[in-house]
Structures are given as C-alpha cells and as structure tokens.
C-alpha cells in the first residue's frame, strides 16, 4: 500500500551554493501554472490488478468498456529498477511486441509501472550499480514508447530496502551534502535516459514535492534524518535535466480527504511546494509540474475492514459509495489532468468489482465533464464518522532481531479483512518500524509473528486505549 514526509535552509536544498533568481518563490506572486495546452480530466486505473502486456493485447476491447482513460502496465521483468545487474534487453522484447500489436482506442493515457525497492548492496555512489539502473530505466521508457504510452508511473515508496534513507555508515562516512550531490546527478541521468526513449514523457509520482515539503517542515529542516531524505536531490535532478517532461504530483494523501475544502487547500499547497527546490528550478516547477490526485477504493469502501480508514466508521455501503463519488468528483474537478484510482481488493479486469463502484465513478466523471454540480451533500453522515476517525489511536514501535529491523514480521491486532488478513497493523520499512491503528477505546492485544521465530514479549496487551503509543512498544526476536 502507499504511506506518509518535511523548510530547510538554503544549503540543504540547493545541495551546492544558493543561487539568485528572478523567479518568485512558488506559491507567491503569480500562481504556479500547469503545463501548456488543453488538458482533459482522466481517470487512470492502478493497483494490484496491474495487467501484463499480454493480457492487455488479448483483452483490450473488453478493457476499454471500463470507465478509464488510461491504465498502468507491469512489465514481465517486474517493476523494480534499482538493481545491481540490469535486466537483459531481450527481456523487454515480448512486452514491446505486445504493446505495438495492441489496438488502443479509448485507453490512450497509459503508463508503465516503475518501483524503487532496493536490491541488497545497491549504492548511489557505485557507478556500476547506477549503470544497471540507468539501463533498466531506458528499457522501461523504450517499452512505454513501443505502446505509444504517455509515460511512467514512478512509485517512490520502497516496500522493503529504501534508496532514500541516508546514514553515514552506508556511504563510507561521506556527508549528506556529498551524497546528495551524487544523487542529484543520478536524477539528471534518469531523466536523460527517459528522454532518449520517450521524449516529453509524463512521470506520475505518487509521493512528490507536496509530501517532501510537509516532511521538511515536520523535521524542522533536518532533511538528512528523514526517511525520504535522498528523494529530494533525486527529484531536483529531474528538474535540472527536463526537456519537455511533465512531473505529476500524485498527492497520495488525498486518500484521506473528506471535503471539497481539503482539495482546495491541497491546490494552494501544491503551488507552494516547488519552494523545496533550488531557486534555479522554480521556473521549471511552474511550467512542468502538474497536480494529480489518488483515490483509494479499499479505504473508502472499507474493503480492508480496517480502522486505519474512514470507510470503517461509515454505517453502510450507500454512505461509502457516496463518499467515493464525492472524492472522485472533486479529484477530477481540481486535478490538472490525472486522477489515479488505486485498488487492492478490487480487480476491474477479472470482474472483482464491488456493487455500485463503477456507477459511482461514471457518475462523478460525467458530472465533471458536463460541468454539473455533484448534486448531494455528504456532511451529515461523514461528520459523525470523522469524529471517530479523528479519534483513532496509533500504536507504534519496532520489530527487531539482533538490533536489526525485521521487516518480514507481522503484527496481529485482531482486526481482519473479509479474507481473514491482518488489517490494522503494518511493518512499514526495513528498520522494522510498525504502526497499528485502532479505534478509540480499544482493548486487545498486539502479537508479533514470523515462522520459526519467538518474540519477547510474546504479546502486548492494552485496555481502553485513548492516547497514542508511538514509541517503545517494541518486539525483539530471540
């Protein structure tokens, strides 16, 4: 799944000396503009149902009956690009042939999926490692071009070992600024590789500058201590080298929006988010950054049966479908171009679609297209659910073995989805940090589990929890 980021002093942000610029800081003076041209509002499908190129080739006629203007394809190699050895060129040939042979008609805003889980031992400072990654990036872009796709989905959430965390130990004692300088150059190389195969590509990044700005503020400028510290110089390199590319801020936190005002505030924040870049890139931010939104089906429709999401606190399916239509409507209304619809337990291509879901998407899309109002209010029933949602409690800590994070462990809470899978707790990074979200007043136990491993303590018990337990609720494997 997808998760939460950080204003720093000039030296942190430029990663060199500060440069003067005649451009106004983003969010001041003239509002940030969007890329030129007439833009349509388009729904993009993304999720655990990402189809293969072969499936798309064989089923395109049926797929184009769904309410989307674009889809996301996962390649036969997988989606990770930060590998020590590049995928062979021949591994992409099947995907390229399939996409060339697919007669796309209405699905014309398509993307190849790219993720960043780090292969053990990969390092930004290694030229050989970066050569392998750049080769992968070039082949991903070349494959997108074969299908006449508009670009790449770039999901920076690592789902394992992260390329974004800085520690001196991982970089031979080199300073954060020294490493950042290399990472920024890698970002330039990334964009040059994309441009060589897919000029003018659109890169949809689920976490982008709005998230980085938030985490910088939360960290009080201590960028190097943040989980995504090295993402900022990497993205800075994108803007340095851009030659007509568009960078779409996917605003993943829009999963949690509950009102029109949430969307309006996010637009203002997007305008100012370019301020985390060096001043020489403010103009490029104004001309090449685009605002998008994500809608999380499972969270709104309570498909996880998890207290982590507002859908858990709504009373019935009708309320959830109305909230879904509301969020899709205001996402489309406020986005510059794209709204990505993310699902884990809904599969459009295999017919696993909850009742009413497609009708809600179509209704929202058609109302925005026709310039019509939403036509109903959600305040009455959402406000009550929001009270409980805002009171939910976080319990967090680490799961470790020998002092090292144990990201493969699970924490069981007693909250399960419809298939019996844990729904309240997640171990979310390679440090073994976990987070459990429970309702206000919850009583129960948290139990770590991993095959062949015994933990100390065996479990932690809680009674009438009304305050966050955000640290030291740790479990250690024996």
Image (cartoon, helix red, strand yellow):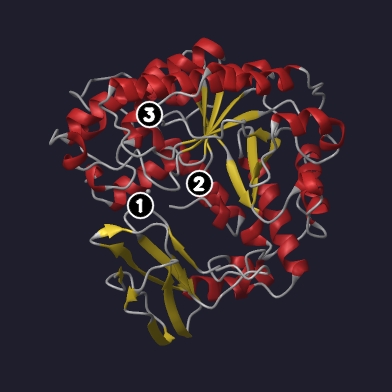
458, above or below 186, in the image: below
Secondary structure beneath dot 2 equals helix
194, above or below 477, in the image: above
On the image, which quarter does residue 23 sit in?
top left
Secondary structure beneath dot 3 equals loop
Check whether the beta carbons of the residues at disc 1 and disc 2 lie within 8 A of each other: no
**Among the two numbered marks 3 and 1 on one chain, the one whose residue lies closer to the N terminus:** 3
Q: Residue 6 in the image: x percent, y percent?
A: 32, 46
Residue ranking furthest to the top: 196
Q: Who's the residue at 46% across and 41% down the image? A: 207
Residue 78: image tag: none
Q: Give the class, few, some or many, for how many residues have Cα within 10 Å of label 3's Cα (few <14, many ≥20).
A: some
On the image, which quarter does residue 231 sit in?
top left
Q: Give the class, few, some or many, for how many residues have Cα within 10 Å of label 1's Cα (few <14, many ≥20).
A: some
Q: Residue 229 in the image: x percent, y percent?
A: 30, 41
- Depth check: give the residue in front, 452 or 115: 452
Q: CA distance from mark 1 to mark 2?
A: 30 Å
Q: Residue 222 in the image: x percent, y percent?
A: 21, 46
Residue 430: image tag: 1
- Depth check: give the residue in front, 436 or 322: 436
**Among the two numbered marks 3 and 2 on one chain, the one whose residue lies closer to the N terminus:** 3
Q: Residue 465 in the image: x percent, y percent?
A: 42, 83
Q: Give the class, few, some or many, for how many residues have Cα within 10 Å of label 2's Cα (few <14, many ≥20).
A: some
23 left or right, relative to 196: left
**Among the two numbered marks 1 and 2 on one chain, the one whose residue lies closer to the N terminus:** 2
Residue ranking furthest to the front: 452
Secondary structure beneath dot 1 equals loop
């Amino acid at each position: 799944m997808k998760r939460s980021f950080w204003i720093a002093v000039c030296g942190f942000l430029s990663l060199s000396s500060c440069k003067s610029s005649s451009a106004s800081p983003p969010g001041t003076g003239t509002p940030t503009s969007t890329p030129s041209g007439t833009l349509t509002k388009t729904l993009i499908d993304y999720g655990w149902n990402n189809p293969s190129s072969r499936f798309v080739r064989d089923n395109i006629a049926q797929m184009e009956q769904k309410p989307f203007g674009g889809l996301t394809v996962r390649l036969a190699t997988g989606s990770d690009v930060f590998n020590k050895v590049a995928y062979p060129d021949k591994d992409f040939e099947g995907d390229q042939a399939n996409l060339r042979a697919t007669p796309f008609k209405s699905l014309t805003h398509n993307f190849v999926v790219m993720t960043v889980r780090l292969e053990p031992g990969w390092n930004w400072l290694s030229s050989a490692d970066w050569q392998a990654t750049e080769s992968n990036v070039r082949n991903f872009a070349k494959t997108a071009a074969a299908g006449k796709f508009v670009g790449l989905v770039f999901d920076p959430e690592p789902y394992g070992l992260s390329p974004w965390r800085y520690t001196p130990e991982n970089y031979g004692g080199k300073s954060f600024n020294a490493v950042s300088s290399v990472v920024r150059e890698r970002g330039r190389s990334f964009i040059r590789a994309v441009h060589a195969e897919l000029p003018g590509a659109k890169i949809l990044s689920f976490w982008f500058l709005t998230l980085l700005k938030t985490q910088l503020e939360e960290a009080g400028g201590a960028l190097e201590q943040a989980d995504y510290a090295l993402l900022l110089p990497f993205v800075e390199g994108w803007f340095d080298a851009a030659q007509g590319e568009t960078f779409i801020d996917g605003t993943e936190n829009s999963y949690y929006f509950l009102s029109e005002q949430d969307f309006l505030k996010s637009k203002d924040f997007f305008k100012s988010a370019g301020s985390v870049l060096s001043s020489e890139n403010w103009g490029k931010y104004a001309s090449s950054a685009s605002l998008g939104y994500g809608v999380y089906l499972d969270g709104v429709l309570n498909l996880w049966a998890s207290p982590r999401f507002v859908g858990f606190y709504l009373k019935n399916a009708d309320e959830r479908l109305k909230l879904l239509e509301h969020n899709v409507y205001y996402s489309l209304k406020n986005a510059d171009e794209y709204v990505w619809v993310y699902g884990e337990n809904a599969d459009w291509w295999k017919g696993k679609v909850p009742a009413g879901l497609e009708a809600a998407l179509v209704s929202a899309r058609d109302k925005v297209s026709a310039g019509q109002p939403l036509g109903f209010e959600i305040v009455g029933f959402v406000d009550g659910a929001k009270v409980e949602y805002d009171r939910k409690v976080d319990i967090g800590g680490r799961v470790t073995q020998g002092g090292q994070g144990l990201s493969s462990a699970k924490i069981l809470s007693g909250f399960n989805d419809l298939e019996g899978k844990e729904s309240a707790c997640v171990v979310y990074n390679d440090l073994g940090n976990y987070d459990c979200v429970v309702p206000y007043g919850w009583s129960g136990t948290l139990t770590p589990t991993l095959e062949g491993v015994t933990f100390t303590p065996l479990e932690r018990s809680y009674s009438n929890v009304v305050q966050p337990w955000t640290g030291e609720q740790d479990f250690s494997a024996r």
